[in-house]
Image (tube, rainbow, N blue to C red):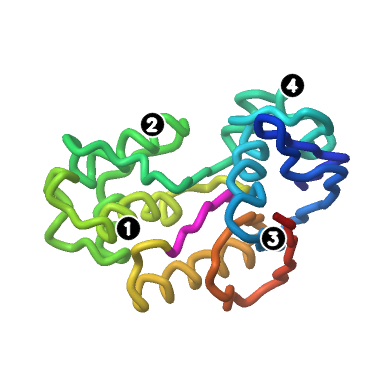
Amino acid sequence: MLEIHNLECVRGDHRLFSALNFVVSPGELLHVKGPNGSGKTTLLRTLCGLSQPSQGKVLWRGEAIDALADEYYRELTYIGHLNGVKDELTAVETLYFAAKLSQQEADEDAIYEALRRIGLRGREELPAKVLSQGQKRRVALARLLLNTTRLWVLDEPYTALDVAAIGLLQEVIAGHLNSGGMVVLTTHQDVEIEGVVRQLNLAA
């Protein structure tokens, strides 16, 4: 379970949000909404330990994430605005190294199947620099088809995806929730996912 207690984040002289409290339990999705500049990305980065709050705590299973360190990160998958896909690497290589960094098994057959399912059949061995933005986004999101982490934190995951890819991603997220996973995401689109979906609105 992910718990947020009295969280406050400040950017420069501007307080993005304060006294923020919420819980995400197994099987739940939290849809973080708000206008540009309201702190959505900052909140997600804070949940991942990439940004430090000015006040408050992020707890995982009752313990502060900074104390858990690698124990927490092994159960977390974060996909941000940037795809984290290097131009020189192929889709297969990207997923292989992502699995290794997450200390998960990097099964070649599973990698090819994930890329096929995400719509990249025939492009598995191409360097990312020749892929479109939508295809690079698919490479990043293919990680979700492979990993076994409990908590997914996704920043605008639908960006640059077509209707078919969005539908597939929603199915994958629904399956994750159904198996007891947790998801925190931001998106300007409607979230049409089966399961427990709650909203958190951040003011500008």
The quarter of the picture where the C terminus appears is bottom right
Q: Amino acid at mark 1?
A: Arg
For the residues labelled 4 and 2, say whether their Cβ atoms are less than 8 Å apart.
Answer: no
Residue 110 or 191: which is nearer the viewer?
191
Q: Residue at x 30, y 41 (%)?
A: 85
Dot 1, how many residues are within 10 Å of its Cα: few (below 14), some (14-19), or many (20+)?
many
Q: Residue at x 71, y 62 (%)?
A: 28
Q: Which residue is mark 4?
A: 67
Q: Which mark is residue 100?
A: 2
Q: Secondary structure at mark 1?
A: helix
Q: CA distance from mark 1 to mark 4?
A: 33 Å
Q: State the image coordinates of residue 188 (x, y, percent, origin top left).
A: 54, 67
Comes first in the chain, label 3 or label 1? 3
Q: Amino acid at mark 4?
A: Ala
Give the residues drawn in magenta, as a range. 152-158
Q: Which residue is mark 1?
A: 138
